[in-house]
Image: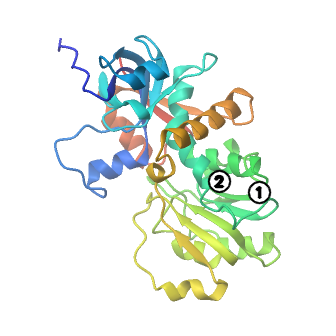
Amino acid sequence: HHPIPPCPPGHILIRNHYAGLNFIDTYHRSGLYPREPPFLLGQEGGGIIASLPENDDTIAQLGWKTGDRVVYGSFGSYAEFTPVPIDKVIPVPPDMDMKTAVACITQGLTAHYLSSSVGNGIAHRGDWVLVYAVGGGTGQWTAQMCKLRGFRVIGTTSRCKAGEVANVCDELIVLENEPSKSYGDYTSVDIASRVKEITDGRGCKLIIDGVGKATYEISLNCLARRGLFVSFGNASGAVPPFPVLRLLPQSAYVTRPKLNDYVSTREELMQRAEEVFGWVIDGKLKIRIDRVFALEDVKDGHEYLENGGGNGKILFKID
């Protein structure tokens, strides 16, 4: 048995019940996104408040108390206890279970900013958007939120996951499976031609691409005039440098965003979280918990995700 760690100033100590698994965890582990070792993996979790800092005015204003159910997005969630900055802690709604609440954090908040903020002013209701990998966690969230925003959604998925997401998109492009990969075979279908066919030759105003190296050329070829290519992930590897002149044919835009810049204030974090929670509670968003691993089986969880097993949210249970 180890002692309960102290609660640092400006933090709340969380007794974790679940931690979420995300592709970014594999990037930190592999060194694609370097971090200074030693470090704890995981950047989302949920549980109960174990302890609070003394004489903290923010705690008094927010009304936190020990035992409250909370979730958060902060480093170090693969642990029994995690000290989390006060402004990163989010209360769990009374009518939501902890597994669902944790699933809403990284993937749900990412999908929220991708569907509502990144393309704001570029894509409008009725426009076509392309969302890759709708059979996976973030893709499922993003496609559903894009439809809630009034966009028409084209999704891609591998054949083995197609049956689970048939109703997520307006149009679904099914790829052949790519063995031992988290994404489909993007050479098996001429996606650019299918997109042009679906959109009557116009292309997509917004392309949301978390696959990366295997798809960026396709994305550039699917853009509508003055469309936006959003590259937010690296499931197949990082996007290599390409000439800015590639954007010239459609006067297109490109961005490489990250979640932290879209929840940079407490107010923005809570606005996004509350809207996502509300959609889930109202049944407007369908959440799939794919697998729950024990924390000691982290290796199995990472291999499952990287080998293409993820068909929804993957969690670690912390006893």
Q: Can residue 317 be seen in this view?
A: no
Residue 243 percent location from the top left of the image: 46, 86
Q: How many marks?
A: 2
Type of amino acid under label 2: Ser
Residue at (69%, 44%) from the top-left corner? 163
Task: Indicate whether 69 appears above or below 146.
Answer: above
Q: How far apart, in angstroms, are the residues tagged by discs 2 and 1?
A: 9 Å
**Which residue appears at 39% of the width and 23% of the height?**
57
Residue 78 shows in this picture: yes
Percent across and percent down for residue 169 are 74, 52
Q: Name the residue under label 2.
A: 115
Query: Looking at this view, is 8 or 176 the one in front?
Result: 8
Quadrant of the image containing the N terminus: top left
Task: Kindly identify the amino acid type of the residue bearing the numbered disc 1.
Answer: Phe
Packing grade of label 2 (10 A; few <14, some 14-19, many >=20) is many
x, y percent for residue 122: 69, 68
Residue at 43% x, 60% y is 234
Helix, strand or loop at label 2? It is: helix
Residue, disc 1? 151
Image coordinates of residue 188 in percent, x first then y, are 60, 68
Mark 2 vs mark 1: which is more N-terminal? 2
Q: Is mark 1 on a helix, strand or loop?
A: loop
Q: As rendered, which of 47 and 266 lies closer to the eye? A: 266
Q: Are marks 2 and 1 in contact (CB under 8 Å)?
A: yes
Colouring convention used in this rendered image of the protein:
rainbow
User: At x 63% / y 65%, what residue is drawn?
Assistant: 207
**Image mark for residue 20:** none
> Would you identify the image quadrant in which residue 205 lies?
bottom right
Are there few (<14), some (14-19), or many (20+) residues within 10 Å of tag 1? many
